[in-house]
Amino acid sequence: MSYTYKKKTPEQLEAIAAGILAKKKDRCNGFVVNIEGIIEDCDITILPRSNGLHQWVYGYAAKDPHYIIVAEMIVGSLPTYRVVLAEELSHIVLEFDLWTADKLPEGAHCHELTPEQHDEIEDNADYLSCALLCAKDHFSSQYHRRKSEAQPLSNDQDRITRVVIDQLAKEDFGVMPMLAARRAVQLGLITKDSYKRNFLDRIPL
Amino acid sequence: MNTSPAKAFGRWLRLQRQARQLTAREFAIAIGLASAEYAEVELGIVEWITDAQEQLIPKALEFSPQEVAAFESSLTQAREATPITFESLFKDRDQLAPVRACTPYRKQLTEADRENILKAVFAPLR
């Protein structure tokens, strides 16, 4: 196996996201990042296709770096669609060398990766997509603001967490609640236990 | 080499849309096309533009009279040119093969999945 993926740390991923968002301030509407616009700015065409593509894949970065293919079925679900686009853009950013070479290195095709490599690559792309869609400073400040507003309404901390994450996802950042919850874990705003209890165990995947 | 009039029309329409800060998804909805159909239009496959879209596009993009004339002229040329198919745009199918993917349950793609994906991508839209 000749392909090596060097896993990025959360700090490195935060820095990459911050760099992209700083260059694309004009692509932000309030807290909502226009990921479709950023992708088009990169001269990448978003190509929705149908014919049951969603059975295998929600979206992917194609060998030709000018195309991100998405299953048409998910285009209608904007929060999901945005997450898929952000994740594919993240893949291109994180492994840009794959797309600049004429040929993929041996062992780099998605089906050739070891399970460990697959997990590391997907973990990093997932982290970066969360960081792109929910900018660190905005997300943290909105979390604290929403939490202080919700605090007087209930003594149940789990309920407050769910309400706050739901508001952040739907009203502020335009993402799925699960993504907002993962972002809250990444930034240390909620614990992994709280995430599991309030989101993972409640929503069938 | 001359650019095909249909491809030139698709590129022109894309530029008009982008100049108005509209995403392809939003614009497809505005002109009554599925997003996959509209994506093909921007690649030069103009068969999706019927009379309804011919009326809706200038309205959705708020074309000036000059832009309407340019739109109609460019569309006429595109329709008169040899039709483009999706397959003819990507003669090397591998160009659209998945390198990294977002899959249900985060499943790692197999070689068989890769082939099924390419079959679905290159199948004509229904």
Image (tube, rainbow, N blue to C red):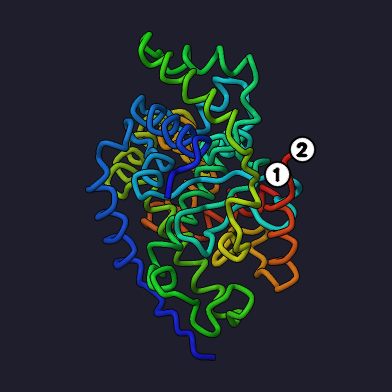
Q: Disc 2 marks which residue?
A: B126
Q: Is any part of residue A151 visible from this angle?
A: no
The quarter of the picture where residue A15 lies is bottom left
Q: Secondary structure at mark 2?
A: loop
Q: Quadrant of residue B33?
A: top right
Give the x, y percent position of residue B4.
Answer: 50, 41
Give the image location of residue A150, x and y in percent: 43, 31
Which residue is denoted by mark 1 in the rendering? A50
Residue shown at 55% from the left, 84% from the top: A107
**Image mark 2: chain:** B
Q: Nearer the viewer, residue A129 or A190?
A: A129
The mark found on residue A1 in the picture is none
Amino acid at pointer 2: Arg
Residue at 64% over, 38% down:
B83
In the displayed structure, A31 sits above or below A1; it is: above
Task: Answer left or right for A173 relative to A141.
Answer: right
Quadrant for the C terminus of chain B in the image? top right
Circle 1 residues within 10 Å: few <14, some 14–19, many ≥20:
many
Taking depth in this image into account, of B124 and A154 the one nearest to the observer is: B124
Q: Are marks 2 and 1 in contact (CB under 8 Å)?
A: yes
Report the residue at 43% width, 18% height from top: B61
Image x and y of residue A23, in percent: 23, 48
Depth check, front residue: B55 or B85: B85
Residue type, numbered disc 1: Ser
Q: Residue furthest bottom?
A: A1
Identify the subunit bearing mark 1.
Answer: A
Which one is in front in this view, the residue at disc 2 or the one at disc 1? 2
